[in-house]
Image: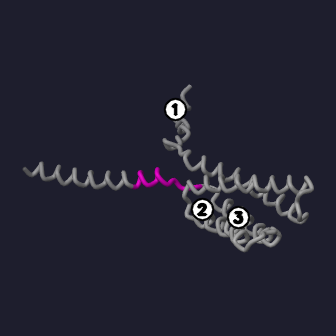
Amino acid sequence: MHNSRYSMKHSTYTLEHSSYCCCAQQNRDIIPSMRHTWTLIGLLAGLCLIGANTVQLIPTSTDAGRVGWMLYLLAFPLTLAGLVWMGWAWTAMVCVIYGTVGLALDLATVASILGGKGEIESLFLFSAMSGIVNLSLILFGGRAFLQSFQRTALPVSRPPNPPSPSSSSRP
């Protein structure tokens, strides 16, 4: 009877301990941590600065259009930077999507200006800068997303110990 109590306590502890480890492992797999967090936050901050200047240059016919551009160029990157700061890996993929849409808009704007259909020539500079930052956001966001799922399954092995001096002294 004494042994069964001891094993029962031991199995309860083991069960509680493995339950704790299982939950911690499960959360880590659902939301893995992300690398390049500060790089992505810096790129999103750069897009906010470019977007603040671009909002003033964009000709809009209504106030609703200007508010929409302000939300897209300012509020969304700031919100996304806050989520990236939390370190969740899925936010890196959102950065890739946001950068892809932004790069497409930048290329369309540059093509329109070069085709002579653009109304504002100073918008060309901001579109080119924004395109470079969006391309960097795509590259670093994709890299951060992919690296967040690559972990070493086994610990790195140590190099072998050197032979002892007594074994090498034999003739």
**Secondary structure category for the residue under label 2:** helix
- Taking depth in this image into account, of 82 and 150 the one nearest to the observer is 82
- Taking depth in this image into account, of 112 and 2 the one nearest to the observer is 112
Residue under numbered circle 1: 167
* Distance between the alpha carbons at the discs numbered 1 and 3: 58 Å
| Badge 1 density bin: few <14, some 14–19, many ≥20, Cα 10 Å | few
Q: Which mark is residue 84?
A: 2
Q: Residue furthest left?
A: 1
**Secondary structure category for the residue under label 1:** helix
Q: Tag count in the figure?
A: 3
Tell me which amino acid carries mark 3.
Gly
What residue is shown at x 55% (from left), y 31% (from top)? 168
Residue 77 against residue 15 in the figure, above or below? below
| Badge 2 density bin: few <14, some 14–19, many ≥20, Cα 10 Å | many
Residue under numbered circle 3: 42
What residue is shown at x 63% (from left), y 65% (from top)? 81
In this rendering, position of residue 1 left or right of residue 136: left
